Amino acid sequence: MSQSPPSPLVPTTLGEHDSLSSAPALQGKPKTPLAAGLAIIRAGLSAFWHTVTINGKVMAGSAIIGFFVLVALFGLIFVHQDPLAYTSDLVAAPSAAHWLGTNQAGNDVFIQMLVGTQVTLFWSFVTGLAVLVISATIGLVSGYFGGAVDDVFSVIINVFLVIPSLPLAIVASQYFARTEVTIAVVVALTNWPWGARVIRAQTLSMRSREFVTAARAGGERSWRLIFAEILPNQVSIVAANFVTTTIQVLLAIAGLEFLGFGSTLTVSWGTILYGAYNQGALILGAWWWFVPPGLCIALLGSGLALLNFGIDELADPRLRRERPAKNTNKKAVA
Amino acid sequence: MMDVSYQKQPLLEVKHLSVDYLAGNGTVHAVDDVSFTLRRGEILGLAGESGSGKSTLAYAIARLLNPPAVITGGEVRYYPPARPAEAINVLGLSPAQLRAFRWNDLAIVFQSAMNALNPVMNIGAQIVDVLATHRPGMSAKQRRERALELLRLVGIAPDRINSYPHELSGGMRQRAVIAIALALKPDIIIMDEPTTALDVVVQREILAEIMALRKDFDFSVIFITHDLSLLLELADQVAIMYAGRIVEKATQRELYKEPRHPYSYGLIHSFPSLHGPRRRALGIPGSPPDLRDAPAGCAFHPRCPFATIDCTTALPLLRPVSAGTTQQVACHLYDPQFTAEPPTTAAIAATYEARAEGSGVR
Amino acid sequence: MRHLIRRLTIYLLAVWAAVTLNFFLPRLVPGDPASALFFRLSQHGSVSPNLLNALKIEFGVDTKDPLWVQYFQYLNNLLHGNLGVSTTFFPNTVADVINQNIRWTLTLLTVSVLISFALGTLIGIFMAWRRGSAFDTTLSSLMTFFYSLLYPWLAFVALYFFAFVLGWFPVLGGGYDASQYTPGWDPGFILDAAYHAILPAFTIVLSTIAGWMLTMRNTMITTLSEDYVMMAKAKGLTSRRVMFAYAARNAILPSVTSFALALGGVIGGQLFVEAIFSYPGIGFSLFQGIQNDDFALTQGILLLVILTTVVMNLIADLLYTVLDPRVRQERSA
C-alpha cells in the first residue's frame, strides 16, 4: 500500500445523504371522485384503527366504550317495546320472557336498560361536550390574554374548584323543574373548573412560544390565533381532559338522578337506580333491578378510565409496562 | 497483557464487560466488550460523546442499572487494598454484600447535584444517612461531627448543615455531593461529569478541590467527561469510548503527544486552541451511530477520513500500538494485517485540516 | 407565606360565592318561590297556613325591602347560626338538626378517609416498587374498575350482599339499635355504634381507595426513576429506607394536593352512603330534606358541607407546606 491515505469511502463534504429525498413518490392520483372518497375513508379507518390499537389500555377502553355505543345505537332495533309498559309479572326474577326480570311496576328491566343506555350515553356525552366548550373557552381566553383578564378568571376558576361540585349541583337543582335538561345544565356548570385550569396552564406556556409571536407579528387577530393556532396544538390534552370529564359527568348525572332530580318519564341508568331504591328493591331482594344499572355505570366508567390511563402512558413513557425483547444468547447478570 | 510502566497494584479490574438495553424495537449494545484496569491512586479518564456508553459503563460497575438495561457478560473484580488477595467479584455479590460494598468501597458523584440530592432532606441528613447505615457503632453526636467535618473539607460553611438542596448554589450543591461521597473514605470514586453543569470559574474551583482531596485521602477516580482537554490535564490514564467500545487507551502524555485513533485526534482537536495561528475549526462530521443499528465492522468508519473497505467488515480489537508499548488502540490503521505503515500524528493532522479547509466552516 | 394568604383569599371567596349563590338561586325561579314551595309541600301532606307566612318571610316575597337589604339580613342570619326552620323536622330549626346529626357524619368520615388514604397510599407504594408483577397488574386493573363505582350503588350492593343475603349486618342500617341503646358514653352503645358503622365505612373506603392507590402508584413510578433515588441506592441504604425516606416522601406530595381536591367528592359521596344505610348523619337528613322539598334544611346542610370542604382544603395546604421545604420560601407564582 502507498503512503498516502487510502481512498475514503465517505465524501469529504459535510452534507450527508438525505434519506427524505429518496422516499418513494406517491402512487398516482385516484381517477374518480368515488375512488377518491373510498381512499379517504380507508385512510381514515386505518388511522382510526391504528390509534385505537396503539396501546393495550386504549384498546380495552375503546372496546368497552364501543360496546355501549353499539348497544345504544342499535339495541332497540332488535327489541320493540315500551320500557314503561306494564306487564302482569311483578318483581319477577330473570327468565326467558324477561332477561333481566321485572320491577315493582312490572316493567321489563332489560328493555329499560337498553333505553337507559341510549339516554345515559347521550346525556353524558352532550354534557361532557358542554363542559369541554366552557372549560376550553375560559382556559384559552384566560391563558392567552394574561394580565388582568387572567387574574380575574384564575380566581374564578380556583374558587369553583374549591366548592365541591355535587353539593353545589344539589343546591342548584332543587329549585328548578325536575328534568334531564336541568341536570345537564347544572352538571355542566359545576364541572368545568378542572379542565379550565389544565387548558389555561397549557395556553400560558404556549403563549410565549415562537409560533404565537410569529402569528401575532403577522397581524393575526386574537380569536383566530386562539382557535386556529393554539387550540390545535393542545388536542391531546383536550382529548384526555374530555375523557376524564365524561367520567365525572357520567357519575354526577347518575348521582343527581339517584337523588330524584330526574324526570319521572325518563328512563336512564340513574333513574332506574332511583326507582329501585325508592320502591324497596332491597327488601324485595330484587338484585336484578339495581345491579345492572350500577354495574353498567362502573363498566362504562372503567372503559373511559382505561382510555385515560392509556393516553397517560403514551404521554409519559415511564409509566409504560416494560416489555422485554427476546434475549436469546446471552445470560443476563444484573 | 503486561503493563510495564506502572508498579502500583490493581484496584479494580473490568474484563470484557457488556451491557445491553432491551427495547421493544431492537437491542442496543450500550457497552461492548470493555476492559480496563484501575490502579491505586490513579485517575482514569473515560471520554466520549454522549451515547458512547461511558455513564452506562460506570453504573454497570456499581450495579445500578435498571431494566431494561442488563449486563450481558464480563467480569468486575475489586481488590480491597487491605486484603488484595481476596478479590471480590462485584457482579456476583449478594444484595446484602452489595449494600456493604456500596459507598464503603465505591462511591459515585453524580452529574447533576440538584437531581442527585433528595429535595426534602437537608444535606446534613443526607450525609448522616450513610453513616447511620454503614457505621452502626457511631453515636448520633459522632455522626453529626463527622458530617460537619466533611462539609469543612469541601469548603461548605458548617452552618449550612441544615440547608435544603434548593437553598444552596450550584457549586455548593456539587461540593455537598462530593462530601457525601467521601463520608466513608471509599477507595474508588466514580465521577460522572461532576462539573459539566457548572460555570467555568466554579468548575476550576471544584476540580482543584477534588485533586487536593485526592492527595489527602488517596482514592482512585474514574472520571467521566466529554471534555477531553480536562482529562489531558487531570487524568493519569485515559480511555476513549465510541459506540460502546474503547477505541483508545493511553497515558495522559501519550495521548497528548500522539493520539493514535482518528476519533481521538478529532476529539482532542475539536476544541480550538487559544494560541497559534488562526485556522478553520476542526470537527468530526456526522454524528454518533444509532446503537440499535450500528455499522458493521468499525463503528466509526462512516465518519473516519481513513476508512477502507476492511473497516466496514472487520471489527478492530484493542491492541498495543506497537509491540511493547502501553498505548492501545482499536484501529486497523495499526494492524499489520491491514496497513503496512501506520500513519504518523502529522499525517492524521494533515487529513483533518484538509477536510476542514474544504468544509467551509469557519 | 404569600402563597398561603392567596389560598386563604380563594377559600374565603369560595365560601362567599356559595353563600351568595344560595341566596340568589331560589329567587331566580320564575314566580313566587314561597307559594310554589307551599304548593309542593301541601302535596306531601297537610300543612298549616302559618307555614306559608313563614316561607314568605324566608324568601322575602312580601317584604318591601329591596334585594340588597334582604341579602344582608340573610348574611346576618347566617353569621348568627340561624339557618331557618326545617319543614321535615318541624318545629326544630335546621341548626338543631345539624347539631344532632353531625357527630355521626364526622366520625364516619374521619375514620373512613383516614383508613382509605393510609391503606391506599401504602398499597400504591408497594405496587410501584413491585411494578409489573402479578400483584401490581391485577390490582391496577381492579382499581380501574373500582374508580368509577357510584357510591350509592356500591352501598346498595354491600347492603344487599352482607346484610340481606349473609345477614351479618342489620338490613335496616341505622347508626345504632334504638330499641336497645341510647346514645351515651357507655361501651355497649359504642360497640353497637361501631358495629353499625362497619358496613358504611367499608363502602366509603372501597369507593375512595382506588383513587389514592393509583395516584400514589403513578407518582411513585415517576419518582423511582429520579436521580436521587439512584443515588440513595448507590449509597447502600436499605431498600426500606430508599423506598420511604427518599421515594415515597417525595411521591406523596402530589397525593396530598389531590387529597384536598378529592375530599369534596368524598364528602359528597358520603351523603349517598348515609342515605342508603339510613345512617343518622347529616347526609341522611339531606336526603330526607330533598325528598320533602325542605329547602331550609338542604340549604343549611349544603352550606355546611361546602364550608367543611374549604376548611379541609386549607388544612391540606398547610400540610403541604410542612411537607415540602421548597414551598416555604416566598414564591411569586
Image (cartoon, helix red, strand yellow):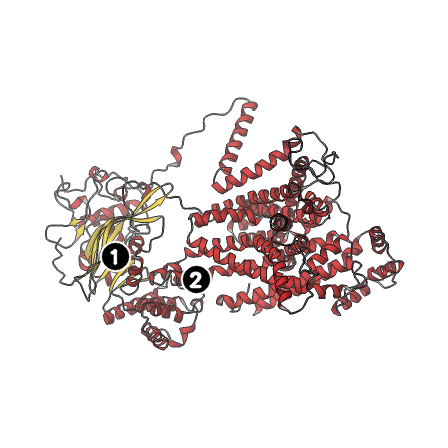
Q: Residue type at mark 2?
A: Phe
Q: Are marks 2 and 1 in contact (CB under 8 Å)?
A: no
Measured as percent of width and height from the top left, residue A62 is found at 54, 39
Measured as percent of width and height from the top left, residue C200 is found at 62, 56
Q: Name the residue beneath numbered marker 1.
A: B90
Tell me the quarter of the image containing the N terminus of chain A.
top left
| SS state under label 1 | helix
Q: Residue type at mark 1?
A: Val
Q: Nearer the viewer, residue B194 or A166?
A: A166
Q: Residue furthest left?
A: B324
Q: Is residue C205 above or below residue A34?
A: below
Q: CA distance from mark 2 to mark 1?
A: 27 Å
Q: Is residue C171 left or right of residue A206?
A: right
Mark 2 packing: few (<14 Cα in 10 Å), some, or many (20+)?
some
Q: Name the residue beneath numbered marker 2.
A: C244
Mark 1 packing: few (<14 Cα in 10 Å), some, or many (20+)?
some
| SS state under label 2 | helix
